[in-house]
Amino acid sequence: MTPAPNDLRPSPTLDDTDRAILTELAADGRLPNNALAERVGVAPSTCLARTRALRESGAIRGFHAEIDPAALGLPLQALVSVRLSAHERPVVDAFRARSVRLPGVVSVFHVAGAEDYVLHVRAASADALRDFVLDHLAVDPAVQHTQTSLIFEQARGVG
């Protein structure tokens, strides 16, 4: 399996203006270019060119709407820690590729420590969360163990 595109791309070299653009967009991804340019102290054309370059380099991965999961009928959130039974690259890569496509999976984190992955999952109910674990993880031959932690509250940090 081939690495994710970001793994092949060198890290972009950022200057103070690039970092200012990223900081402003992290706070408000819907900020119009002219307002963004004013906040970071550059001409709108310069700001637009730099923002495009940041997207092309992978420094900006995308723009997303943050939706209340309950509005989608998925009020229950959990972090499901997964320990794999083997750690050969094909097993790890295949699990990652499968897990990001599972229903309800918001994010997949490959982590260091006792567990190998943490999946951020949304579900309609506790029963649906149990079914997700049983139907998608417990039956996966690559999965040795899972542990589920319910999320009571989520707050976004300034990063």
Image: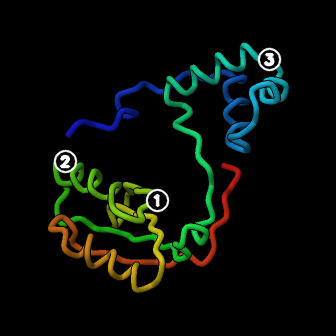
Q: Is residue 42 left or right of residue 133?
A: right
Q: Is residue 36 left or right of residue 86?
A: right
Neighbor class of circle 3 (other Cα within 10 Å; few <14, some 14-19, many 20+) is some
Q: Which structural element holds mark 3?
A: loop
Report, in whole angstroms, how far the alpha carbon at label 3 lies from the one at label 1: 35 Å
Mark number, residue 106: 1
Report, in whole angstroms, how far the alpha carbon at label 3 lies from the one at label 2: 45 Å
Q: Position of residue 86 (x, y in %)?
A: 16, 61
Q: Is residue 56 left or right of residue 23?
A: left
The residue at 33%/75% (across/down) is 132
Mark 1 or mark 2, earlier in chain: 2
Reading the image, the residue beneath label 2 is 89
Name the kind of residue labelled 3 in the image. Answer: Val
Neighbor class of circle 2 (other Cα within 10 Å; few <14, some 14-19, many 20+) is few
Q: Which of the two marks, 1 or 2, is nearer to us in this view?
A: 1
Report, in whole angstroms, how far the alpha carbon at label 1 lies from the one at label 2: 23 Å
Reading the image, the residue beneath label 3 is 42
For residue 90, above or below residue 21:
below
Name the kind of residue labelled 2 in the image. Answer: Arg
Q: Position of residue 43 (x, y in %)?
A: 80, 15
What residue occupies the far bottom of the structure in this picture?
127
The quarter of the rendered structure image containing the N terminus is top left
The residue at 46%/64% (across/down) is 120
Name the kind of residue labelled 1 in the image. Answer: Val
Q: Is residue 134 left or right of residue 71?
A: left
